[in-house]
Amino acid sequence: MIKGLGGFGDMAKMMKAAKDMQDKMGQMQEDMARITVTGESGAGLVRATCTAKGELTALEIDPSIFVPSEKEVVEDLILAAIKDAQRAAEEKMQAEMSRMTEGLGPAPRHEAALLSGMEQGGDDIQALIALMARLPGLGPRSARRIVLQLVRRRSQQMVQLSQLLDRVAQNSRECVVCGNITDRDECAICTDPARATGEICVVQDVADLWALERGRTFRGRYHVLGGTLSALDDVGPEDLGIPTLLARIDDESITEVILALNATVDGQTTAHYIADALEGSPVTVTGLAQGVPIGGELDYLDDGTITAALRARRRL
């Protein structure tokens, strides 16, 4: 055998594997066009069916929701059902792709060499990198850079960080009044007399509370629901902080309830539920304005945002 030709055997195998993969991809595309998935919203009032490729094929709407005054709600339910079906289609496609690539064998030698360079730091360091990579907004590359920075400056940063993490793990808890995260029974906002303005801002979770606080505009108090109503997930008012909210309105002499919930179907359903529960009370119920963001360009906005902005227009 002539030396140096051994690589051609590997190349032939790679070409055959590529041809097999191409044939499988073609067959999968045909299968995905036949497989259908269904998404729904409003506890099944609207059902959308599409192929696993994401093409909408059917739309079923319960006649009971056709109320002229609820036109916007119906539109939101239809859009949510279509998005739910498309999400299911994407998950189906990814599952099929994963199943197809399971038999491709180990990574090529040069890729294995690159991966082995990640294992030189030791088991504990690799475990720390893997844990960091699971945090929101971080991936393996960012996690490696952070861990490397901490290791290089362990005396200035890592020791102090580990001590703070330990204290937060031991002491952090939910505020017994509003649901904010704090290291005491009541957070600083609830214990500040200056924040007792008679206004209470209702948010879905603590991240929303912190976002509003960054603006330094609202000076009242908050109430964290801990989620939104969802018939699909079997989340009802008793599973959220709604009963506590209603009790706080009476106990704290609240005059205005600001519903700062997300502009999603579940968020707006929760907002309508709270507004209905407060109907007839002397409390003013308001919601956040929706429309064009500061610095936004109309050409880049979605149709729903533009529609909301037009409905909320005001005199200049």
Image (tube, rainbow, N blue to C red):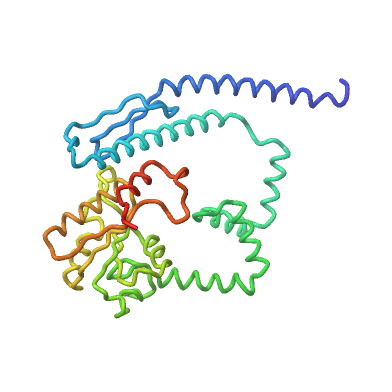
The one nearer the camera, 54 or 213, is 213
* Quarter where residue 211 is shown: bottom left
Counting from the top left corner in percent of width and height, residue 180 is at 35, 67
Q: In this view, does 219 lie to the left or right of 155?
A: left
Q: Which residue lies furthest to the bottom in this view?
A: 193
Counting from the top left corner in percent of width and height, residue 55 is at 41, 27
Q: Which residue lies furthest to the right in this view?
A: 2
- 262 up-or-down from 19: above or below: below
At horizontal 61% and vertical 61% (from top left) the residue drawn is: 146
* Quarter where residue 3 is shown: top right
Counting from the top left corner in percent of width and height, residue 145 is at 64, 58
* Quarter where residue 101 is shown: top right
The count of marks equals 0
Q: In this view, does 131 lie to the left or right of 231?
A: right
Q: Residue furthest left?
A: 280
Q: Is residue 22 left or right of residue 74?
A: right
The one nearer the camera, 30 or 101, is 30
- 198 up-or-down from 93: above or below: below
Considering the image in quadrants, where does the N terminus appear?
top right
At horizontal 27% and vertical 76% (from top left) the residue drawn is: 196
- 138 up-or-down from 95: above or below: below
At horizontal 47% and vertical 55% (from top left) the residue drawn is: 295
The one nearer the camera, 164 or 242, is 242
Considering the image in quadrants, where does the C terminus appear?
bottom left
Counting from the top left corner in percent of width and height, residue 123 is at 62, 56
